Image (tube, grey):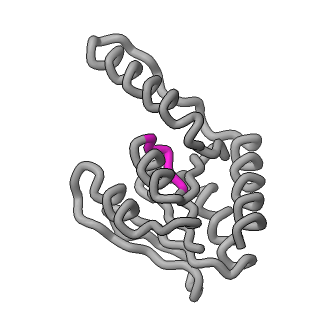
Amino acid sequence: MHIWVDADACPVTIKEILFRAAERKQVMLTLVANKALHVPRSPWISTRQVGHGFDVADDYIADQVEPGDIVITADIPLAAEVLNKGAYAINPRGERYSHDSINQILGMRDFMDTLRSSGIHTGGPPPLNQADRRNFANELDRLLAKHR
């Protein structure tokens, strides 16, 4: 099992939870981003810097992921792709994507993109709060316990 992180937009507090989990469970954690990242020294934690460009980090993760791996991302198309490869995907708020929900989530994403492109201001997601961090940590622990 390997944990892959779409790290360009991953909140710092979520990365800290991931660092602790990788050490505690002794599972490989790789943060993928188009910029250099600072991570704790650990045999369980690594980074992979990819080139700049649209979806470069997502494409790298999709190419590397294997069945049973866990991917941390808020990117819905990446989540759909890794689910199709037999991996698990959760977002930084602790919501686990599933085959049952991903098509509905993709549809809503496309609808919101259409609204934004027509000039309607839709706002962004609310800031990450303590409940989100707790939900993320709990969902990550469930996946690690279940699939270790």
Residue drawn where x is 57% and y is 78% of the image: 28
The residue range painted magenta reads 72-76
Q: What is the magenta segment's predominant secondary structure? A: loop
Residue drawn where x is 55% and y is 42% of the image: 99
Residue 74 lies in the magenta-colored region: yes
Residue 57 lies in the magenta-colored region: no
Frontmost residue, 36 versus 102: 102
Residue drawn where x is 57% and y is 88% of the image: 43
Task: Report the side of 141 relative to 5 (left or right).
Answer: right
Number of numbered discs overlaid on the protein picture: 0
Residue 86, x across and y down, in percent = 52, 59
Q: Is residue 104 above or below residue 96?
A: above
Frontmost residue, 43 versus 85: 85
Residue 21, x across and y down, in percent = 70, 70
Farthest residue in the bottom direction? 43
Query: Where on the picture, by quarter, is residue 114?
Result: top left
Residue 53, x across and y down, in percent = 22, 53
Q: Is residue 107 above or below residue 52?
A: above
Query: Where on the picture, by quarter, is residue 148?
Result: bottom right
Task: Report the side of 5 relative to 62 (left or right).
Answer: right
Residue drawn where x is 58% and y is 30% of the image: 126
Frontmost residue, 106 versus 49: 106
Which image quarter holds the N terminus?
A: bottom right
Q: Is residue 142 above or below residue 54?
A: below
Residue 29, x across and y down, in percent = 55, 73
Task: Report the side of 141 relative to 3 (left or right).
Answer: right
Frontmost residue, 90 versus 33: 90
